[in-house]
Image (cartoon, rainbow, N blue to C red):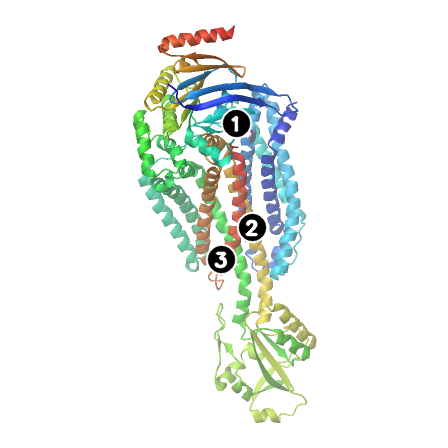
Amino acid sequence: MQKTPVVSVSGLHKTYGRKNEQQYEALKGIDFTIDEGEFVGIMGASGSGKTTLLNLLSTLDTPTSGSVEVNGQDITGFKGKALSDFRSEEIGFIFQDFNLLESLTAKENIALPLSLQGVKKAEISKAVKEVATTLSIENLLSKYPTELSGGQKQRVAAARAIVHRPAIIMGDEPTGALDSKSARDLLDLMTDINKNQHVSVLLVTHDPFSASFCDRILFIQDGQIGQELKKADNNRQTFYQEILNQLGTFEQ
Amino acid sequence: MLTKLSLAGIKNRFKDYLVLLTGLIISAAVFYMFANLATNREFVKSNTQISMASQVFIFGMILLILITIVYIAYANSFLLSMRQHDYGLFMMLGAKKNRIGELVFIETLLIGVISTIVGIVLGIGMSMGLSQILFNQLGLTVHHFNALYWPAIVTTICLYVGLFLLSGIFNLTKLVRTPVLKLLHIDDEVYLPKRRPLVQLTEIVAGILLLAIGYVAMAKIMTLQLLAVPLALVTITLGSYLLFSAVIVGAVELLKQTNFANKKLHNFTLAQIMFRVRSYTRILTIVSLLFALALGAISVGAGFQRQAPQMAKSTSAYTMAINDMDKKEHNLVSQLNDTHTLTYSQKIVGNTVYYNEQEFVDHPLPMLDSRQALNDGSLKTLPIAQFKKVALNDMDFTGLVPKNGQQKSEFATQSDFENLNTATTHTVTIIRLNNVLAQRKILDRLEKLQQQRFPAPTMATVGGFQTYKMFNALFSGLEFMGFFLGFAFLAMLASCLMFKILSGANKDVVRYNMLNRIGTRRVLMKQAVRGEILTLFALPGILGIVDVLFGLQVFKPLMYHPNAMTGWSILIFCVLYGVYYGITTLIYERLVIPKEQMNA
């Protein structure tokens, strides 16, 4: 079965530092694709280049060479309006530190991407309600972020990430600031969104437990993709062990 | 080493320091300009015949000192907000607290001293420039004014350096006492606006009532006398405060219900305003009051000055009387526009000046309708019999005699007048014109020529022009002070508001960064910044203008149209205020709006 790729990355290089200064190559040629509806994890130690990669995929940074296509469009050449519009329409972000606006209620936070796209009030209300029901946060909608727990905040952030039906959700250590119970809930929720709403997910993490929820994991080491692990028909526990083993071989 | 590090920190944020320094320099310059007037007793004495003037200046000085204190406090909090993270980091790396304290103290004081010195130099320059403009453009005459005035320099240095010493001590204790971790993570104190409709409603009602009491008090100044001013000050201050806190929250909540809120970043902007209401209410109240005071000072000053021509009209039925007009004078008179001229013959016998009655029948000499204060200068013509009676006691008529010492005026019938045996027949020509101000240069020359030919010990000429010149001299001082006061207040209040807003910027950096990440167009972010700051600027401005429109009623007993110049001063004011708004927005955008891409 040939699926169309949502993300396709080829020959991606990123070098920091100017030509006449000392240079540092963070990414040394990365190639991979993410198919529609896939749940892909990117793992790697600190300094391996995973944050750089995520920044390039989400257009927050520009590559030195290589191309990134999202939904069939080459995003590396985007500038100005096209750039922001791409981010607000095609990508849903979930960050480690939630990145909710503390001056807006949960509902207003969730509605933000739709407001940016100029969606009508009635439609916004409908979409927010729908997504809130899916994530069981209807009773939190009128609260401000400071009145919410970490897990609740991340649910609201997840709602904001999917409310505008992006092509892909990108999570940057989304469980990093959560306790284990909330982390598991969030990962279940992301799996649920992935399976039932058919939204592709890209999860960047260094935590094997989070990674075990993915369908496929790309291990990135020193700016290159070293290994690829597929869950296939394994259950999550077995996959978790496999990941740990894989990480173990990296250490040596 | 630490000194080097801290200098490097300043270098990195040079632009922010530039903002801080520029603001402080302008503040010091404005203060110097004001102190220059206020501490110059001879100037105040010679330019106002009003005994109240020096009190007005002392009052203004106290106000300006208060504003300066508030202003420096805000500027200092801006400085501290820039530096605390750096210093926290140094401490975490093991720098001694005392050493850090020392550095902060020196940095604060250094900034203070530099800005004070540059500010005074700028102030001297501005004093020269502004006074030149006022003297030349508006035809003001002001005595004993020096751009460079030592007592003012000393006063400014004392106040500013003193305040910066205090700020330095404050910063030192604050940094030394705050735990390092807190310095590194200065979190936003989150304020959740509570929705209490009943309290809000009470606040609105009480606010409006208090404002109304204040406005009425000012309008009834004749009956309330001096009590009106303090009463109005207290009620208007309280009223503005209540109204600001209630109306902003209420209006934002109402707007949030509408479709408007869901468009673009509107909801974000509204939330920003809502979240800042509490910390802004006080400064908005102060700003609105200062705005009113500044605008009022300019309007009153300009209003008095503008009323000099009107005063001239109300004191005499004609602008100038010219005895025995010669060729030169005739030429000048023919250059005047929009004039009425009347010429009467005079014959002089001994100490008496005779007039031909018939000439007054053919061309009656108009007289003032009323000689009361603040009359509108309208004229009347009387039947000859009545005119003859009234005229001999009327200054306008008796003043027509040539200034050679003759005292008495008499009317003669035409035949009697013709039979009077004198060598020459004199004439007197009366000029009446509507626009004295525009043609004052020609009138000045005419007056000089008359003075040369008829040197008089007391009065050079009679008529409205004489009065105009007298009042012009008197009101020039007032207008000059009004402008100075007004601009000093405006510059200070706008700078205050600017720094209050700017010192909140570092909290906004995170928010805008997040908006950028989820794909908000830069245009929208800029609009959000502009909208938010516009609200903070516009609200006190609007209330300030309303305050002024009512406040000027205080001057009704003294002035024809207290509001005559308000339109103009509002316009000038809004332009200057707008410039401040523009600068604040530009700086704010630069501070908070991130680049779309990291290395773009």
Q: Is residue A194 left or right of residue B467?
A: left
Q: Amino acid at mark 2?
A: Phe
Q: In this picture, is B324 found above or below B580?
A: below
* Residue at screen point 45% across, 43% down: B535
Q: Secondary structure at mark 3?
A: helix
Q: Position of residue B508 (x, y in %)?
A: 48, 33
Q: Secondary structure at mark 1?
A: loop
Q: Secondary structure at mark 2?
A: helix
Circle 2 residue:
B487
User: In which image quadrant can residue B219 be found?
Assistant: bottom left
Which-is-in-front pick, marks 1 and 3? Answer: 1
Crowding near the residue tagged with mark 3, few <14, some 14–19, many ≥20 C-alpha atoms within 10 Å: few
Instruction: Specify which label sits upstream in the sequence, 2 or 3.
Output: 2
User: In which image quadrant can residue B94 be found?
Assistant: top right
| Residue B95 in view here | no
- Label annotation for residue A128: none
Q: Position of residue B575 (x, y in %)?
A: 53, 51
Q: Amino acid at mark 3?
A: Gly
Q: Amino acid at mark 1?
A: Asp
Q: CA distance from mark 2 to mark 3?
A: 16 Å
- Label annotation for residue B567: 3
Circle 1 residue:
A61
Q: Position of residue A159 (x, y in %)?
A: 36, 27
To the question of a shared chain for discs 1 and 2, the answer is no
